[in-house]
Amino acid sequence: MASFKFAAAALLALGSTTFGWQTQTSFVPKTIRQSAIQTNALYANNNNARRSSSSLNMVVSDPTETEVGGRGGMFTASNAENRRIVPEDVRGRPTMKIVYVVLESQYQSSMTAAAKRINAGSDNMAIECVGYLLEELRDDEAFEQFKKDMADADVFIGSLIFVQELAEKVTEVVAPLRDQLDAVLVFPSMPEVMRLNKVGSFTMKNLGQSKSVVADFMKKKKQEDGSSFEEGMLKLLRTLPKVLKFLPSDKAADARTFMMSFQYWLGGSPENLESLLLMVGQDYVGPIVDSMKGKEKVVMQEPVLLPDTAIWHPVAPDIVFESNEKYFQWYNNEHCPEAGIDPKTAPTVGIILQKSHINTKDDTHYVSLIAELESRGSRVVPIYSGGLDFSGPIESYMYDANGKSIVDTVINLTGFALVGGPASQDHKKAAKVLKKLNVPYICAVPLVFQSFEEWQASELGLHPIQVALQVSLPEIDGAIEPIIYAGREAATGRTIPLADRVNLLADRAMKWSNLRIKQNKDKKIAVTIFSFPPDKGNVGTAAYLDVFDSIKAVLKQMKKEGYDVGDAPDSKEAIMESVLNDPEARINSPELNVAYRMSTEEYYDLTPYAKDLEENWGPAPGNLNSDGQNLVVYGKQFGNIFIGVQPSFGYEGDPMRLLFAKSASPHHGFAAYYTYLEKIFEADAVLHFGTHGSLEFMPGKQVGMSGQCYPDRLINSLPSAYLYAANNPSEATIAKRRSYSATVSYLTPPAENAGLYKGLKELKELISSYQNLRGNEARGPAIVNSIVSTAWTCNLDKDIKDLPPLETYDAKNDTKERRDDITGKVYAQIMQIESRLLPCGLHTVGVPPSAEEAIATLVNIAQLDRPDDGIEGIPRVIADSVGREINEIYRGNNQGVLVDVELNEKITQASRAAVRALVQQSTDSNGRVKEVKNFFDEAGGFFGSLMGAKKPWTKAVIDAGFPEVSEERLAPVFEYLEFVLKQVVADNELGGIMELLNGQFLMPAPGGDPIRNPDVLPTGRNMHALDPSSIPTQAAVEVAEAVVRKLIEKLADENDGKYPESIAFTLWGTDNIKTYGESLAQVLALAGVRPVSDSLGRVNKVELIPLEELGRPRIDVVVSCSGVFRDLFINQMNLMDRGIKMA
């Protein structure tokens, strides 16, 4: 009998393929045998869980050496001609031409095989077939060829067409031809594409527009259990007989054909697709129907379908298992002994698979990772779902009978969001399911729109559309580590693994699992601190963070949870001294504590890419982090905890060179530091401490690292937790994607008013005196003269254009109104300076906010109206109580109207007093807020409310001079502020760090400005950026249009009524994340273009605002984009491009 292990290896090489397929470039029999032998040897030696020095060659030939010719889409050189099948000998049979468009290429080989089988074996028809990948339609030449193919097509098939602009292209071509086509089969896609469906009398023209049996069923299922469209379709297949009872007989037959077609399509195998083509051809394609009159129709085999959800393993005797009990009975008792895995002690990795790849036998990349994990001694639980919601299979298969998680890490190999895939996502549901499972969640990415060659040659890396669908959206679920692990072979469309990436993915999954299994006392953790800005600041700095005080708090928590922290000091000064020896030491100072001296021989032996650094830095050890003979690692070890100093960028005179020079590289000292952490100290994880270091900015691709990218090379297999400022999601996203870091947000210190000093303070006192004596004709003008003189001394003439000249002005000769105007404008400028927000001190991890810090944060939050939540800002409510509109007051304040400046200041102070009253009821004896108390928590408050007493914050506003303020209108904003205060107090920063180090799932949260978006709170969660398809939001568009209107009015007033011809704009990544795309919306508004949501609520379209509605000329915009904006918002770059071209 053949060896079981050799059979497994053969399956690995073949991808469990049951039908033959070969190309001239790869997967020939000889190399299959070689790969099988290699894999057999790997299984034989799999007790060693450590990574082998040479990677298993899972890919039989290097996919990057394959040349691909022909045109393609914007980022894809694939060619539809590779998917064109023309019958060699028609033999007098009628020919059916089929054109299909799919998101991914896994159907290519099955469609090709099905068409060839019909051409070879059917007496009734021949098949001409051509397929397009959705992304190819971006290319003008490919799109024109698609039009030509559709012009004489008989049948159109589409699936997973969820990219709006490409859905529009498909609709543009197919819709006019729909009536002449014999059949149109569109499986889950955008609604406008689904409405093209036509099978006889069956149609979806009214999908989403009026009542239909199908639409009603879908709607009911979504209401019942939140099913996505595809989930609803799957349920509909099972409920088919009940649905068909309500349809006329002819419609029932056509509806049955559509549903059967969908079942065949889901089946995905050549046999299923052959039945699909035969059924549609003999029943709906005119020439074939005519030729078969009097002949007996072919009776189709029932679709061969796998269960909707199950556990799949490539070498299992049963194709799938529908319960984990049956799976583990086979796996633990039969497979593990053969593979050398100890099921009692082995870590277990859950793997999420895409069913269509299993159906189409396009599963080599799945088999590859399974083999790599098992070769390292891990068990695997590979699950799949027929739909796009994987939460159900996780609940069904990743828990034991007692409800305990049986996995230590989960890897999602689909690359899609856990719930909803590329269509409509439910991130809250996904995060809830993953938190219940509570293990690290890695979402790896297969190349879909690029070939290996394009990806490796691209400086950008991963295709922008794929970044949006398969990196950004999974991050909102809480996913980490978007590692490229597979891609398609251009000629066949089959998915093949990339050996070194699969190895890395397996290594990292094992390391994360190890954090969950290993006892805390045995874990080694490397805490890495920085010197940033490069070569400028002192060691141990980070944005808004007291680094050493925070490290003290982390060490204390580690000790509490059983980590070995040795003799770590209990004061920040002692920790700093032990690491630095000299608190003022610079990064290149010999005074830093040396933790390890690495000989050049050891360095070259342990650092595989060391030779590549010599082009820029010469041979090791070089001059940086070196004592002349050895490479030096700075830091201090306490028990199993190492506090290390990340080396500088390296280019002392030009520290940013690394970001832009294509041939640049980290220096030997930088490489030696991470080599030390991984291979000498043998860290189980590294904790990067604060915003930010240099690792994530090292040369390499933007997203989708290769093995040649330096962030990938440096971090290698080390799990990385990264403490990052909550207000900087754009650079945190870079760290997540380029250095495979799970981020933990920390709260930035509150912004407090800047205040006044010296001459400015004197100026405010003069204005206060004038307010009291303005009617005094003797003293009033003298005070105004002093105000003008002091304003010139403080250089306010640069801000106040019509400030009277100092030498000639005398207020005695001016009118009272003019004196008020001058004083008002100076006062407005003083208030603007005083109210500017500056960060207040540094934040310490794990320390609750002081009452003053809480007040500063809440005052800023309370200023904003939040119409979506039905909340009015405190200033608006107070202004209304005196019969004024707050925006009018702001406008008058900006124009220097003295009355409005005074009123604005009075409202500001009243708002602060009200917030202080709220916070004081929760302030402890140390002046800190640890627990938020409700007004009714106190007996006095409860009985006072019964007696009609005003709440403390209302009383504070009344005492500030606004007796008519409405307590009822203040209630929503103070209820909201109380909620926000609870979030501020409930920070989980220490808890978040420990959750990652303990191998648990850290809940996701948006990053940004907590004042504008309090959802950023509480901190201590895995920070992500926005869903790139969600901005600009409607609220951001409304704000942007108002801002643009005011800007243009102001510029026209200053230019004799003439509108500006052009305006320059800079778009920043962080600003657009914080404001949900306001700056982007301003650019579009200037050009007279409005963003529009598509049918799934995604902002993928723009429309031109008619000039009649716009009421002004369109204005040219010169836009400069930051690198972060360009990389994070490639979709919005395209949106702007389309909008400007329309204008």
Image: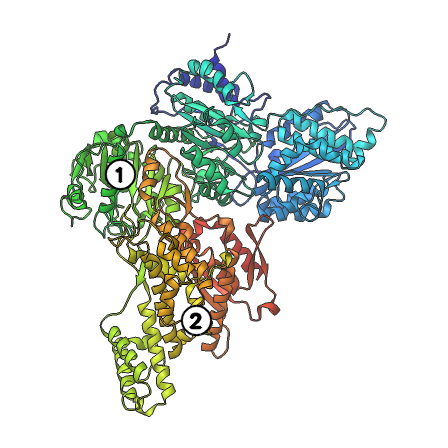
- Residue 1051 in percent (x, y) is at 46, 73
Taking the image as drawn, is residue 646 in sight?
no
Three-letter amino acid code of the residue under disc 1: Gln
The residue shown at (27%, 79%) is 766
- What is the x, y in percent for residue 518? 31, 27
In the foreground, 458 or 444: 444
Quadrant of residue 86 within the rendered picture: top right
The reply to whether residue 479 is in sight is: yes
Residue designated by label 1: 557
Q: What's the mark number on residue 964?
A: 2
Residue 663 screen position, x and y as percent:
34, 43
**Helix, strand or loop status at disc 2:** loop
Q: Nearer the viewer, mark 2 or mark 1?
A: 2
Q: Looking at the image, tell me whether mark 2 or mark 1 is earlier in sequence order.
A: 1
The one nearer the camera, 359 or 1013, is 1013
Q: Residue furthest right?
A: 294
